[in-house]
Amino acid sequence: MTSKIDMGKAADGNAVEVDLEELLATRLLVQGNSGSGKSHLLRRLLEGSAGLVQQVIIDPEGDFVSLHEAFGHVAIDASAYSIPEIMRMAARVREHRASVVLSLEGLELEAQMRCAAGFVAALFDAPREHWYPALVVVDEAQIFAPAVAGEVSDEARRASLGAMTNLMCRGRKRGLAGVIATQRLAKLAKNVAAEASNFLMGRTFLDIDMLRAADLLGMERRQAEVIRDLERGEFLSLGPAISRRAIRVKIGAVRTAARSASPKLIPLPDQAPEALGELLLAPPTEAELAPLAIPAPPPPPAADEMIARLHKPVPSPDMPPEPMPDEGERAAATAEALAEVAADPASGMRPAAELYQDFLIRCRMKGVAAATLDLTAFRRRLAMARAGVDDAGEWNEALALATLLPDEMLGPFLAIARAARHGAECPSDAALAEVYGTSSLGRVRRMLGYMEEQGVLVVRIDLAGKRTVSLPRLGWTTSAADPDPAQPSRLARIARRR
């Protein structure tokens, strides 16, 4: 079967089509500066091939999540899951031929690279019986296959670059057709770009990128200037799946839209400078001083629930029923297993998914075969156990306030709340880092800043450098303490200089 996808119009008015079957065998590279229309082009390609082939989209900006409503793609928010969970989902994606959008919007650069590396590696390592044809679209590919080392760790860069190289170099035999888009060819690793046989080159202005694009299109260097003159949404196309000669194509319209859009000019406020000055310098109102009443965001679906959306397994009729102890025995065994996990001194630095597997094993050893807590509930109960907080009514308000925060911040928040409730010293950065499961004190300080932005707590640093944290909605406040006891306080440093 040969399927043609209409991408738009050539200069002579004829339709420019992409042969989907040929594209699966020869891969595609899209290049163009920011605002040239790369995402629009990818969206046109995805909409035209939806229903004809499985689609897997690595989306660093969350622009393609809108395909979920129009075409039924499963949207996965990568920030809500661990790397092992992401890899499990990727294996199910190949097994059940589900079209998905992996949104990396909520992650920092290094986390995006690690997540994409794990996801693509799991797609690549699928067993032979799951090698179904699939388009793997990677937007902003220079992030995941950089030409030179950047600010991320060498480990993350090597893993991400290796996964993208496997996708473009060896993915064809496994049914994976790479479609990569980049802002600058000079920033994209050459061994990744060189494996594409089809090209769509959009507007670019830097000489080095124009020359590389012209070289890939088989144009002479003196002809490279034409790339600078392309309009937004226009691309020079070449390749066995498109055309044997380079032709200019204007990409057609799309049905769906990205959540982000180009900025538009709007009129400035028609007010005198004096009036604007009075507005800016006016004292704070009562509403501004009050904590913001931010509604709690809906919790992300658990990994098991997300995997269930990809496939709903049918239980075997020959499988014997699991033993079902009474409710009291199950609750006691669950609490005991949870306490054992929380008491492990090394558990603070282990991933939640790994701890959850440890918890399930402990439950089975105690005679509870079926899981009594899913991963989300386990994270919550583990954070409460570490902070010394139970389900008693006196903590209901604090637990309700914690719903404004991501799940991974529950443990540090409860540690602060416990100290504030009893007027104890504010936990140090090192203590919060241990509960947070990180060795970075800077990440702890950013976490406190985020909590303050959400109106959950207020941080105050006195002249001596000691920190006090208040929870205005609960009326609780910690006593002042040095956030980094390993360093001398500000007053001590002044006294030492004298």
Image (cartoon, helix red, strand yellow):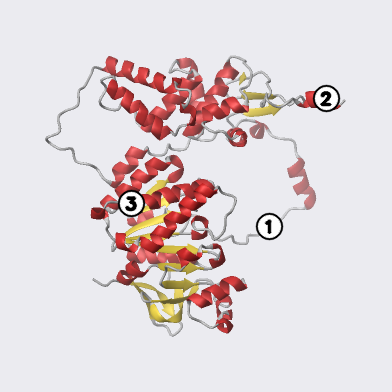
Left or right of 453 on screen, residue 277: right
Q: Position of residue 452 (x, y in %)?
A: 61, 33
From where the camera sits, is residue 376 visible?
A: no
Residue 268 is tagged as 1
Q: Mark 3: which amino acid?
A: Asp
Q: Is residue 45 left or right of residue 312?
A: right
Q: Which mark is residue 90?
A: none
The residues bearing labels 2 and 1 have C-alpha atoms spaced at a distance of 54 Å
In the rendered structure, which disc, 1 or 3, sits on the residue that comes first in sequence? 3
Q: Amino acid at mark 1?
A: Leu
**Rendered position, 14 above or below 274:** below
Q: 102 or 216: which is nearer to us?
A: 216
The N terminus, quarter of image? bottom left
Secondary structure category for the residue under label 1:
loop
Do callouts 2 and 1 mark residues in contact (Cβ within 8 Å)?
no
| Alpha carbon distance from label 3 to label 2 | 60 Å
CB-based contact (under 8 Å), mark 1 and mark 3:
no
Q: Secondary structure at mark 2?
A: helix
Are there few (<14), some (14-19), or many (20+) residues within 10 Å of tag 3? some
